[in-house]
Every structure is written in C-alpha cells, then in structure tokens.
Image (cartoon, grey):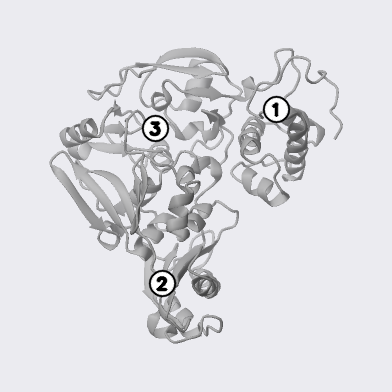
C-alpha cells in the first residue's frame, strides 16, 4: 500500500488520506500531517479505547500494536504509519464479549482501579508476552515499567501479567490476536 | 500538547530525501523514530516548518558488520540493533548500552542514530560513540562527510548536523584484543533517564595488567564526558584493581548539576561508584577474552 504523501510534500494545513488496517479492518481518513496516531484513532476513527495521558511518551496509556509491536501512539504521526497494521484495545476481546486472557487476568487480580491506564497496560502486556512467553518477575516488572498507573501500586498488574503468561502458554495462543468467540465464558472468572 | 503544524515530506529514496532537505535547508527537521522529536513538538519546544519523514523511505536500514567495524544506518531501531547478534557480538558494549535505552516500547520505534543526532547528554548511545571513537556519516545532495564523535556532539541536544544534511549512519570500531567493556547506570526506574551512568573500556597487556582504560559518563555534563584513566590504572592486575585514583580523577572532571531528581553531589558520588563497578566488570571481561 502506498502513501499519498510524496516527496513533493503536503502543506501544513492540507489534508492527506491515511489508510491503516485497525484490528483487521481497513480504515481511512483525511488528516493533516500533524495528526498524532492517538488522535487519529480517537477522533477520526472514533476508537476511543486508546487513552491519552501525558501526550509526550511518558505514561504509556496510548500504547497500541504497530505491525505487532507495542508503540506509543502519541509519539507517532498517522501519516508515518499509512499502510500499516494496528491493534488497539478494541481488537482483543472476542466478538461475543469474552475477555482476552490479559483482560481477564487484570480483572481477576484487580489490576485496575480507575481504568484510565488499563488499555495501555493491556496492549503493552500483549506485546510483551508475545516476546516473552515465559517471563520471570523481573522481566515482567521491566516489561511493564514503561506504563504508569496512579491507582493500583502495580502489584495487581504484575500478578495479572503473570497469570496471563501462564494462561497463554497453556493455550499457545498469540497474545496479540483477538480472542475467539466462546474461548472464555463471558462473566465467568478464569481460574487463577 | 498537540504538535504545531508542519509541512510533510515522505521521500521514497535517499536521493529524494537529500534533494528535499537541500531545498528546505534550515526549515526542515528529519523525522526518524520520533521518540525524542515528537515530545519536543508536542510540548512546542520545537516548531520546524517542515518534517522530512524517513518512515516511507526504501533503504537506509542496513546493519553492516565487517572485520573492523559495525555500521548502522539511519532507520535501524534500537530494538532491531539490540537483537542483531553479529553487531552486538562485534561490539559487545552496544548490547549492554542498548539494554539501558528507554523502555522496550520506545526502543521499538526510536532509532540508534536518531539518539546520537538528538545528543541528549543523558542518552547512552552518544556515550558509546564517544568512548569507542566512533563516527557519524552525513550526506547532502552534493556529497558526504564523516564526523568524529567529539566533533559531532557539541552540547545538550546539539549535534553538528548542518542545514540540508541527513545523518545516514553511525560507525563503531570493533574493540581490539584483551579489551573488555561495561555499561552501568542508575535511574529511579529502569528505562528512565539515568541520574548518572558510565561506559568503560579496559585493555590489558600480555600479563593481564591494565594497559589502557577510559570512561564516558552520561547525565553529568553537557555532552558525554570522556575521561582517560590510563595514568591512574596502568600496570594494575586485572583482578586487583585499586580504582581510587581513577574515581577521584573522574569525579573532578565531570560537571553534574542539581535538578529535581538528584543533587550534583549525589550524582558525583554515584558516578564514582558506577565507575568502580564498571571498571571491575570490564577488566574481568578483558581477561576472559574481551567478551561482553
């Protein structure tokens, strides 16, 4: 897929068409070059699950998967990722509402309180677990260190990532894939 | 917290990028991974009229390992370099330094060369470049030049990248025999900016006594602060270093400042502690065959 942004340039206030595949669905919108990917997702594509906290790369709330790897959407321009694939928090739970193993683990371990940071933590954890299917506690701590939570004190979050790692290793599922319908009974707790 | 408006250029080739940069001159900034530039834009600390984005460029993404050097092109991310065994085997300090660079999510997009161009005095890779005597390759539409680390790193967030120029690659020489290196730093949380940090190399003679030793500190000066410690350490057995003189020398040379994270005195103390540890590690590695 090609971008419309050519070497001849896009003027600062002109709009350019950006097309990305988000959670498996091709989506496009016309945006100015300065449109951050976080705002592109939230305002242009109306995918408001991705949260914006600090908007300068410190808090991690806006983390999404870009071609399978977690990145800060607030430090990325939409025009830069034209033609690429994204996974957001909306792309993890099953169509029937069944929670993704990482989401279920956050629920089981009280890995959230206000929930503002949670989309970033869940998406970061999915990217982390894809790279480290059998992490030790230190690796989990370091892997999650790029995300800030001001409620939980992190203990529940670390426990959740540990449970999700065990769960995903048992099933062999790619943590970055959407959960299949019926994979977890909605509303029931996975044994921890 | 939204970036100011900028014109956008997405060249497909290096030649296109150089032509565009040549036309725009002072008005343009190069966007590579954006992990340092975009925060500056979001906070309105920078407002370039145009960005030349390397994201859609075909090329400038090679990692080349030869007998005497490792060459890393402009689009190579920290994480890709960190996972390149040939490069990190050739320059083992690279691997240890990259482990300290930011958080994994930042490393997925930030580029190794971009960190050097950005020239943050607390960043790891400028110190590696300075310590190892590396170089930066720069190009314009009219030709290329090579800048030595010391000439290139001018001050905090200031590198000698001239209008119309594109930094295309960083080059690190491979260490010689009986040479060991180490990188150590302290931050409140792994991945945050270091309160202080140090990279060292130690080369031993045939009797496994120190022949040369040097260090480059981060977070305690306007640029990486390189200190030659050879006079303080030469002749000492690799497994019985008495680093007090070297630590004293380094603490005199560095110029830490106070901020909300730590006092200058604390940073000076910390730099010495880290130096002592890193020297011991590097000397041990040099004796063991110069690995890691």
Label 1 and label 2 in one chain: no
In the image, residue A24 sits, relative to residue A38, either above or below, namely above
Residues B101 and B51: in front is B101
Label 2 and label 3 in one chain: yes
Q: Which numbered circle lies on residue B254?
A: 2
Label 1 and label 3 in one chain: no
Q: Is residue B272 visible?
A: no
Q: Chain of mark 3?
A: B
In the image, residue B40 sits, relative to residue A115, either above or below, namely below
Question: Which residue sits furthest left?
Answer: B142
**Which mark lies nearer to you, 1 or 3?**
1
**Circle 1 sits in a helix, a strand or a loop, which is it?**
loop
**At x 39% / y 24%, what residue is drawn?**
A79
- Write down the residue under mark 1: A173
Residue B21 lies in quadrant: top left
Q: CA distance from mark 2 to mark 3?
A: 35 Å
Residue B246, given in percent of the width and then of the height, sits at 45, 81
**At x 68% / y 39%, what residue is drawn?**
A133
Q: CA distance from mark 1 to mark 2?
A: 51 Å
**Circle 3 sits in a helix, a strand or a loop, which is it?**
loop
Q: Chain of mark 1?
A: A
How many C-alpha atoms fall within 10 Å of the one at disc 1: few (<14), some, or many (≥20)? Answer: some
Residue B119, given in percent of the width and then of the height, sits at 36, 53
Q: Which numbered circle lies on residue B201?
A: none
**At x 35% / y 62%, what residue is drawn?**
B130
Residue A176 lies in quadrant: top right
- Write down the residue under mark 3: B3
The number of discs equals 3
Task: Determine whether label 1 and label 2 are within 8 Å by CB.
Answer: no
How many C-alpha atoms fall within 10 Å of the one at disc 2: few (<14), some, or many (≥20)? Answer: many
**Which mark lies nearer to you, 1 or 2?**
1
Residues A15 and B10: in front is B10
């Amino acid at each position: 897929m090609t971008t419309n942004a050519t070497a001849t340039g896009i003027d600062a206030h002109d709009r350019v068409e950006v097309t990305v595949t988000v959670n498996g669905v091709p989506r496009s919108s016309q945006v100015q070059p300065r449109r951050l990917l976080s705002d592109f997702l939230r305002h242009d594509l109306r995918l408001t699950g991705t949260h914006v906290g600090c908007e300068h790369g410190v808090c991690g709330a806006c983390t999404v998967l870009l071609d399978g790897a977690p990145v800060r959407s607030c430090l990325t321009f939409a025009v830069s990722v034209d033609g690429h694939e994204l996974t957001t928090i909306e792309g993890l739970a099953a169509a029937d509402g069944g929670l993704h193993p990482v989401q279920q683990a956050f629920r089981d371990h009280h890995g959230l309180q206000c929930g503002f940071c949670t989309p970033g933590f869940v998406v970061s954890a999915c990217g982390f677990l894809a790279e480290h299917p059998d992490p030790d506690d230190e690796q989990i701590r370091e892997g999650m260190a790029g995300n800030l939570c001001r409620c939980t004190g992190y203990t529940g979050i670390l426990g959740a990532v540990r449970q999700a790692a065990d769960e995903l290793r048992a099933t062999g599922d790619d943590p970055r894939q959407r959960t299949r319908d019926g994979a977890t009974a909605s509303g029931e707790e996975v044994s921890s | 917290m939204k970036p100011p408006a900028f014109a956008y250029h997405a060249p497909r080739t290096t030649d296109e990028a150089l032509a565009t940069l040549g036309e725009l001159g002072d008005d343009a900034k190069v966007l590579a991974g954006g992990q340092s530039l975009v925060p500056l834009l979001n906070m309105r600390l920078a407002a370039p009229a145009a960005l030349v984005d390397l994201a859609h460029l075909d090329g400038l993404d090679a990692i080349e390992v030869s007998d005497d050097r490792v060459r890393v092109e402009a689009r190579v991310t920290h994480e890709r370099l960190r996972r390149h065994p040939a490069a990190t085997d050739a320059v083992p300090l690279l691997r240890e330094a990259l482990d300290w660079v930011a958080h994994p999510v930042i490393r997925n997009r930030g580029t190794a060369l971009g960190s050097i161009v950005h020239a943050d005095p607390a960043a790891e890779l400028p110190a590696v470049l300075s310590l190892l005597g590396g170089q930066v390759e720069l190009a314009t539409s009219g030709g290329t030049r090579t800048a030595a680390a010391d000439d290139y790193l001018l001050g905090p967030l200031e590198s000698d990248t001239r209008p119309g120029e594109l930094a295309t690659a960083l080059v690190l020489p491979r260490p010689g025999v009986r040479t060991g290196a180490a990188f150590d730093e302290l931050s409140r949380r792994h991945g945050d900016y270091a309160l202080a940090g140090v990279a060292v190399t130690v080369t031993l003679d045939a009797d496994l006594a120190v022949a040369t030793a040097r260090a480059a500190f981060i977070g305690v000066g306007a640029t990486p602060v390189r200190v030659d410690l050879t006079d303080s350490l030469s002749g000492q057995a690799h497994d019985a270093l008495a680093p007090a003189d070297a630590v004293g020398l380094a603490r005199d040379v560095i110029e830490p400042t106070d901020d909300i994270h730590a006092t200058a005195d604390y940073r000076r103390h910390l730099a010495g502690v880290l130096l002592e540890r890193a020297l011991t590690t590097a000397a041990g590695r040099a004796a063991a065959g110069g690995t890691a």
